[in-house]
Image: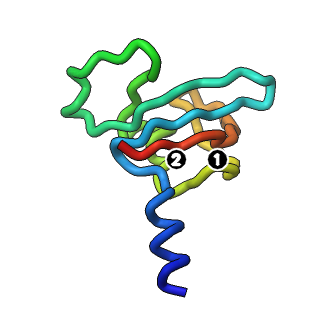
Amino acid sequence: MKEKFQEMESNSIRVGSLIEVAFDDGRTLKLRLDEERDFERADDEYQQVSEKSPIGKALIGHTVGDEVTFRTPSGADVAIMVTNVRIL
């Protein structure tokens, strides 16, 4: 049981993860979850998001296949599916 927990934990989204998500309408997005102080690094492939942003808070702890819902600053609820996670 402990091994299963450790395996699940190692695949969970956390700061430093590269994440791919899909929206209901088929759009996809590549994200890099960073601490706010790490935003000086530029990356053309992955959009940086803060661990403190609505989407960042919602993604932490999730894994591939999870559906995640978050509220945008404008108040809209958005559902996304985690399709890929790579831990740096």
Which residue, as the protein is rendered here, is positioned at the far right?
25
Classify 7 as above or below 87.
below
Q: Which residue is label 2 attached to?
A: 59
How far across and how far down the image is residue 59, in percent? 52, 47
Marks 1/2 in contact by CB < 8 Å: the verdict is yes
Q: Position of residue 30 (x, y in %)?
A: 53, 26
* Residue shown at 55% from the left, 87% from the top: 1
Task: Report the amino acid beneath label 1.
Answer: Val
Q: CA distance from mark 1 to mark 2?
A: 7 Å
Give coordinates of residue 73: x percent, y percent. Answer: 51, 29
Residue at the farthest bottom position: 1
Q: Residues within 10 Å of mark 1 (few under 14, many from 20)?
A: some
Q: Which mark is residue 22?
A: none
Q: Judge by depth and name the residue closer to the eye, 52 or 5.
A: 5
Q: Secondary structure at mark 1?
A: strand
Q: Is residue 86 above or below residue 6?
A: above
Position of 67 compared to 57: left or right?
Answer: right
Q: Quadrant of the C terminus?
A: top left
Q: Residue at x 65, y 31 (%)?
A: 76
Instruction: Identify the secondary structure beneath mark 2.
Output: helix
The mark nearer the N terminus, 1 or 2, is 2
Q: Residues within 10 Å of mark 2 (few under 14, many from 20)?
A: many
Residue for badge 1: 68
Residue type at mark 2: give it: Leu
Residue 71 as seen in the image, left or right of residue 17: right
